[in-house]
Image (spheres, rainbow, N blue to C red):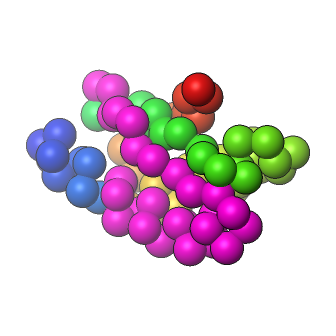
Amino acid sequence: MTTEELKLEVEKALDEIRPFLISDGGNISLLDIEEGKHVKVRLEGACTSCSLNYSTLRAGVETTIKKYVPQIETVENVAL
């Protein structure tokens, strides 16, 4: 899978998650995919200060991304 194909698949996964984040006043952006297996995202809005953002990142974001792109090993939130 090319880098562009990976980005498209990860964006599809994020599009599945976004409505839930937006409904709580947040959002998420894809920043980078390193070595084809490490995804860097940025939680935005209310998600930046939410006490459950780590759980959201692991249980929601990472799980959904891995459903679309199984070779992804890690998902990391890069704060401002």
| Residue 15 among magenta residues | yes
For this view, does 52 lie left or right of residue 22?
right
The residue furthest right is 51
Q: Residue at x 73, y 52 (%)?
A: 46
Q: x%, y% of residue 50?
A: 81, 48
Q: x%, y% of residue 4?
A: 15, 46
Classify the position of the C terminus by image quarter.
Answer: top right
Count of marks placed on residues: 0
Which of the 4 image quarters holds residue 61? bottom right
Comparing 73 with 80, the one in front is: 80
Looking at the picture, does residue 36 appear above or below residue 72?
A: above
Q: Residue at x 75, y 46 (%)?
A: 53
- Highlighted range, magenta: 10-35
Comparing 11 with 71, the one in front is: 11
Which of the 4 image quarters holds residue 24? bottom right
Q: x%, y% of residue 62?
A: 56, 50
Comparing 21 with 1, the one in front is: 21
Q: Is residue 73 visible?
A: no
Looking at the picture, does residue 76 appear above or below residue 65?
A: above
| Residue 25 among magenta residues | yes
Q: Residue at x 67, y 73 (%)?
A: 23
Q: Residue at x 70, y 50 (%)?
A: 47
